[in-house]
Image (cartoon, grey):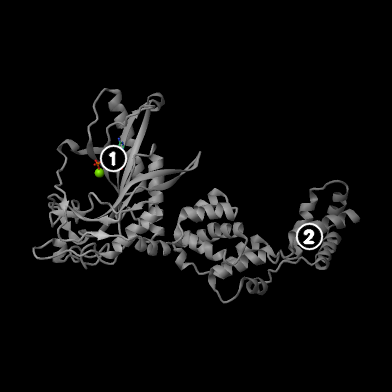
Amino acid sequence: MTPEIRAKYEVVIGLEVHAQMLTKTKAYSNDVNEFGAIPNTNVSPITLGHPGTLPKMNKKTIEYAIRLGIACGCDITENQNFDRKNYFYPDLPKGYQITQDHTPICKNGQIYIKDEKEGEKPIKLTRIHMEEDAGKSMHDVDLYDTLVDLNRAGVPLLEIVSEPDMRTSQEAYDYLMEVRKLVRYLDICDGNMEEGSMRCDANISVMLVGSKEFGTKVEVKNMNSMRNVQKAIEFEIERQIEMVENNETIYMETRSYDALKNITIGMRSKEAANDYRFFPEPDLQPITVLLADIEIIRAEMPELPRDLFIKYTSNYGLSDYDAYNLTDSREIALFYEKVISFTKNYKSAANWVMGDVKSHLNQNGLEISEFPIAAGQLAELIKIVDEGKVSSTVASKKVFPEMLKSNEKSPLQIAEALNLIQDSNEDSILTFIEDVIKQHPDEVERYRNGEKQLIGFLMGQLMRASKGKADPKAANQLMHQTLEKL
Ligand code: ADP
Ligand code: MG
């Protein structure tokens, strides 16, 4: 497609995200909720919907949904009930899913994504509701048959439905990043798309630039990574624009993404849309959420990435880039918070956390929870650099590696034991300078005759004589002064 044709069109995207909640048990039964268990071992008669069984609400799911609602500035619905969404499928043993059709627990609100021009852009939310997952059909494990694992049946889900507010595949990607970050900060979902604990359906349409009416949307399913969501959207944009250019009609349909071929394939048209025959779930009581309940949950909310970002950039003077990186993961942000509870050198703390600390984690495949240096000790290291006791290079190359090995000694003790304490004492530096001048009379003479670049050589000799311990700044000054006075 030529850039000219592409430029004629505007893209509209709305995302539906399913997030599996990190509860110990399932949404309406005591079955264990865990990923990777032996198939069909966490399946009770309640999950199977056998006659005579009754579902029972898992209170945690309400708390988790409200946490997310508060974080996104949603209205929390006071009176809610559950509905049955009926359809027949082998991985749905009950023949229906329990969901919230008319009374989603959260309405409105927004999630902010980063935006080059404005700094941030709000993506409005339509609703967040609670429902239960279906089992898992596996088509590629057995050669002849589809296998069904019902461990996933009844796992609690949050469905987060956005308004059609995104305009590029990058915005969709950024939105998913923010959703994942949020659910992880809130500790309500592990956000792992590869394992299917966070899933996304993308709704995409195209229209001529300036058009007031959105085009017909197509829904794409089955994307198991954020990059694939982005790629599927890119493919759809091209496909739809080409159709419109060829005067073909786009029909509402559900398509599936094939990651290997990087294409989308039609699955079913919305014309033959399922009639789910929603009706109120008779076996579960309606729930009422009181303002007092919301306030209790609000009081226990952790600091959110956006608040931390604002704090770091406005109060601590960090760049947007630093603040964004630090707040990317909650664990990293919490570690940074700890470090800066011991030091006011916010910038240096940020550099250490994003530099030496992160690269140690990356190189060794560690989580920050496994990082061997305590936040207070890292702050000590920052302090001895700030005090001029060791240079930042020595801190990074010599002291930090020792701290990784053992936490027996403080950074200062390590520096002392390794004889790394920087010498800013004028007398001892002057002694070194005099030695250097004596030993290199030719270079000194040439320096005095105008070859000023030889200061580099002389400084090098001085640093060598001091075994790297002379404070370079002080030494440089003294060297200049001494040479001028000769
Ligand atoms: P459905 O009933 O088919 O699920 P909804 O109206 O509930 O449709 O919308 C589902 C998702 O589709 C929402 O995320 C919404 O933002 C998005 N959406 C709605 N209309 C469009 C459109 N014209 N183009 C792209 N996305 C859209
Ligand atoms: Mg839908």
Closer to the camera, 239 or 61?
61
Label 2 C-beta lies within 8 Å of the nearest ligand 1 atom: no
* Furthest-left residue in this view: 51
Judged left or right of residue 110, residue 47 is left
Judged left or right of residue 439, residue 286 is left
Rendered residue at 21%/55% (across/down): 82
Residue under pointer 2 = 475
Of pointers 2 and 1, the one earlier in the residue sequence: 1
**Which image quarter: residue 170?**
top left
SS class, disc 1: loop
- Badge 1 amino acid: Lys
SS class, disc 2: helix
Residue under pointer 1 = 261
Closer to the camera, 313 or 321?
313
Residue 130, visible in the rendered structure? yes
Residue 91, visible in the rendered structure? no
- The CA span between labels 2 and 1 is 63 Å
Closer to the camera, 184 or 445?
184
Rendered residue at 24%/25% (across/down): 248
